[in-house]
Image (spheres, rainbow, N blue to C red):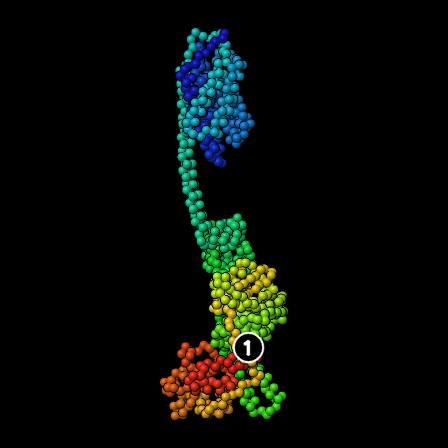
């Protein structure tokens, strides 16, 4: 006999609420699954499966308990009941796992929905099969199909929502819809169930027994408790995750601030790992080395050092750093990306973990390249100063010897018979002395002890006079060409300084042509109109050019070529002062220095000098001028510490008819004057031990006011009181110059200085 069952309305509502709560909990837990990784992700995935599958099973079981058949007592098979629970949880868990890996794949989502839907249907019908009652159960195919479709559709939607829904209101709405859908699937299945009672069943009475209601409430209570605890766990996990995220964000921002501060510090800093590889560097470090960050991070620091510095770092300094924990100002040479060498001082400190392991090495570099270059340039300039002092001393002594030779040759010429051949030989000897005098002038100019004043200089004559010195300075591999126009005005410049500038430019040109080449020295003139050039006055200029066929300079080197101490030569091979000296000479003379150069096409140095009016030039005398005879013999005291020079001066003065008393020192001269001797003139050397020439002059002005004094010296750096107040005679001197100086000293209107050019010395130009 076919019988129809009834449902307890309260339990039906309870089952629907269970379905809604399970759906909400599953959606909430699914959000934790998406936010987790590793084991936590798997744990939340399993919890979601238990919540959804267990909740659906609880809804199904409470719904089954809500069903009763009049006159029948219903019980449940424990094994099939547990199997239905396992099917619900297993199908739900597997579907959640698949959809979590789908990453938006629609086919995989549909497959997961089909699997979960069929699992729920299987759970439903296995659960109904677990019912034990005195009746036979059949299912209408139509309602079975409806239940299957509802289950698959609800499962698919649930899985889609699990990866989409994140906000609480949306989860609540989705949970309501899912609760009704899942409950609808259950009650659609129950609608298609038909029961045929056995013959002994009393169909007149039927109700839900107290045991069914109690069991339903127990299942519902347990389910709600489990779902509530799951939601509480998710809430705390979400809170902890939020706090952890905030801490991570704060830590990340702190690290970024520190990294930005570290990288933007103006110091070239770096950090190394335990193997000496670069972990991070500052912008200043990258600027020093010329690399990009991606080009240096991960590479060993020694990759940026020279071979010698890398060996020193690896074999000596790195082990010492790891042992001592600190390294201070160790010098290395590094190579920039452009291939330039930089001298740096490196300091480093080891950072260790609490257990003592090495975390990193923090270090920094200090670029001392310019300091080293300046120190080397200073050493070179000190060498030059020492050479200059030595040169000045040698030139002084050589001047004394030349004075002796010149004086004795002139005296000898007077005593030789009229023999043309002997006179020619004597004249050659005198010419050699004069050329030696010219050499000493150049040496004194180099030592800065020659009187340097601008004058009208014939540039072609000056360069020709330097020909031999230039050839000796630049060697045989360089050919010298000169090109001068016929009508070239003289330049207003110091001749000695100009010679030194030309010599420096020639030496620079030689160094730029290591394989040999051609050095061209030429001159021209230019007329500048007002406003034609900044820094130069309008007027005529003489342009002296020194051009080589060497390697030339690039734009960066050319821009710094005239800087003091800047040199591209090796250590100890150049001071970087040649071009600055030439530039200074041109500027002080009212001109300028221009440089033109290209790599591989040589260099031209052009000195612009103001033109001077030509000075009248007399014919060069082949023999010495006649010596003027003094009107009356004079009594002269001659003072010199050099016995040869003293004897020579005495001999020339006696030959002029004067009475001469020699003194070998300033003290002896004062003793002669104190003994009552009456002298018309005192001729004294400047550089003497004990009492110098100027000190003797000061004593004479106190003890013998009005006593004429002639100061003999080859130096120009005399005390300030000697300038313009004492008559000077430059060494070496001939008898004519001596006679002229004596006459000038005894006549108040005479000249104050007797220069070498005034004596019309023939031969090469006198420095």
Residue 304 lies in what quarter of the image? bottom right
The answer to which of 300 and 734 lies nearer the viewer is 734
Coordinates of residue 29 in the picture (x, y in percent): 45, 30
Coordinates of residue 63 in the picture (x, y in percent): 44, 18
Q: Secondary structure at mark 1?
A: loop
- 168 sits to left or right of 472: left
Coordinates of residue 422 in the picture (x, y in percent): 61, 88
Q: Image point 52% across, 71% down: which residue?
A: 491
Coordinates of residue 501 in the picture (x, y in percent): 53, 70
Q: Image point 60% across, 68% down: which residue?
A: 519
Residue 741 visible from this viewpoint: yes
Q: Image point 48% across, 69% down: which residue?
A: 589
The answer to which of 579 and 413 lies nearer the viewer is 413
Residue 500 visible from this viewpoint: no
The answer to which of 475 and 463 lies nearer the viewer is 463
Q: Image point 52% across, 30% down: which residue?
A: 104
Find the residue positioned furthest to the left. 702
Residue 669 lies in what quarter of the image? bottom left
Find the residue positioned furthest to the front. 529
User: Where 592 sits versus 624, above or below?
Assistant: above
The answer to which of 569 and 48 lies nearer the viewer is 569
**Mark 1 — residue?**
765
For label 1, count other residues whose C-alpha is less than 10 Å away and answer few (under 14), some (14-19) or many (20+). many
């Amino acid at each position: 006999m076919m019988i129809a069952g009834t449902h307890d309305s309260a339990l039906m509502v309870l089952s629907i609420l269970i379905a809604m709560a399970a759906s909400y909990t599953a959606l909430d837990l699914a959000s934790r699954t998406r936010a987790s990784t590793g084991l936590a992700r798997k744990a939340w995935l399993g919890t979601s499966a238990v919540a959804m599958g267990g909740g659906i099973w609880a809804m199904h079981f409470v719904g089954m308990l809500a069903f009763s058949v009049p006159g029948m007592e219903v019980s449940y098979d424990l094994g099939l009941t547990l199997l239905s629970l396992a099917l619900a949880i297993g199908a739900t868990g597997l579907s959640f796992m698949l959809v979590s890996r789908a990453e938006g794949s629609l086919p995989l989502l549909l497959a997961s929905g089909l699997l979960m839907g069929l699992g729920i249907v299987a759970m439903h019908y296995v659960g109904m099969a677990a019912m034990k009652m005195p009746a036979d159960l059949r299912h209408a195919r139509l309602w079975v199909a409806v239940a299957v479709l509802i289950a698959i559709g609800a499962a698919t939607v649930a899985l889609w929502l699990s990866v989409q829904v994140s906000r609480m209101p949306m989860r609540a709405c989705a949970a309501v819809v899912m609760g009704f859908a899942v409950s609808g699937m259950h009650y659609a299945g129950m609608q298609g169930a038909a029961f045929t009672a056995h013959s002994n069943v009393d169909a007149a009475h039927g109700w839900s027994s107290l045991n069914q209601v109690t069991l339903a409430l127990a299942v519902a209570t347990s389910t709600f408790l489990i779902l509530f605890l799951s939601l509480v766990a998710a809430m705390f996990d979400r809170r902890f995750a939020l706090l952890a995220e905030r801490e991570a964000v704060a830590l990340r921002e702190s690290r970024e601030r520190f990294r930005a501060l570290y990288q933007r510090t103006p110091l070239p800093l770096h950090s190394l790992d335990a193997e000496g590889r670069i972990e991070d560097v500052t912008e200043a470090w990258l600027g020093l080395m010329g690399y990009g960050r991606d080009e240096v991070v991960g590479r060993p620091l020694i990759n940026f050092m020279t071979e010698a510095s890398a060996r020193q770092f690896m074999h000596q300094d790195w082990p010492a750093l790891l042992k001592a924990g600190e390294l201070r100002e160790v010098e290395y040479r590094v190579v920039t990306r452009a291939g330039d060498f930089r001298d740096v001082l490196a300091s480093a400190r080891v950072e260790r973990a609490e257990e003592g392991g090495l975390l990193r090495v923090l270090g920094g570099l200090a670029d001392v390249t310019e300091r080293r270059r300046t120190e080397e340039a200073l050493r070179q300039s000190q060498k030059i100063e020492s050479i200059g002092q030595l040169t000045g001393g040698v030139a002084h002594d050589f001047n004394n010897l030349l004075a002796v030779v010149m004086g004795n040759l002139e005296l000898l010429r007077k005593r030789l018979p009229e023999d043309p051949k002997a006179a020619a030989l004597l004249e050659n000897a005198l010419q050699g002395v004069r050329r030696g005098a010219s050499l000493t002038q150049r040496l004194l100019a180099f030592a800065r002890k020659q009187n340097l004043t601008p004058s009208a200089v014939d540039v072609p004559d000056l360069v020709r006079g330097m020909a031999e010195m230039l050839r000796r300075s630049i060697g045989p591999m360089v050919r010298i060409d000169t090109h001068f126009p016929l009508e070239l005005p003289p330049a207003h410049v110091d001749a000695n300084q100009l010679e030194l500038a030309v010599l420096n430019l020639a030496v620079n040109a030689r160094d730029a042509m290591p394989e040999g080449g051609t050095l061209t020295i030429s001159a021209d003139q230019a007329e500048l109109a007002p406003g034609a050039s900044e820094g130069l006055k309008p007027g005529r200029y003489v342009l002296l050019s020194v051009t080589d066929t060497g390697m030339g300079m690039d734009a960066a080197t050319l821009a710094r070529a005239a800087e003091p101490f800047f040199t591209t030569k090796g250590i100890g091979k150049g001071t970087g002062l040649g071009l600055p000296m030439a530039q200074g000479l041109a500027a002080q003379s009212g001109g300028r220095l221009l440089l033109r150069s290209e790599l591989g096409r040589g260099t031209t140095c052009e000195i612009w000098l103001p033109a001077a009016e030509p000075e009248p030039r007399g014919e060069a005398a082949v023999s010495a001028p006649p010596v003027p005879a003094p009107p009356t013999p004079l009594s002269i005291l001659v003072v010199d510490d050099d016995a040869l020079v003293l004897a020579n001066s005495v001999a020339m003065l006696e030959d002029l008819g004067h009475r001469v008393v020699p003194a070998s020192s300033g003290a002896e001269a004062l003793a002669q004057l104190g003994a009552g001797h009456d002298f018309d003139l005192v001729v004294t050397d400047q550089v003497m031990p004990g009492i110098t020439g100027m000190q003797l002059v000061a004593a004479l002005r106190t003890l013998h006011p009005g006593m004429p004094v002639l100061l003999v010296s080859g130096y120009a750096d005399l005390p300030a009181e000697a300038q313009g107040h004492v008559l000077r005679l430059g060494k070496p001197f001939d008898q004519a110059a001596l006679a002229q100086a004596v006459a000038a000293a005894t006549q108040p209107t005479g000249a104050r200085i007797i220069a070498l050019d005034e004596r019309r010395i023939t031969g090469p130009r006198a420095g």
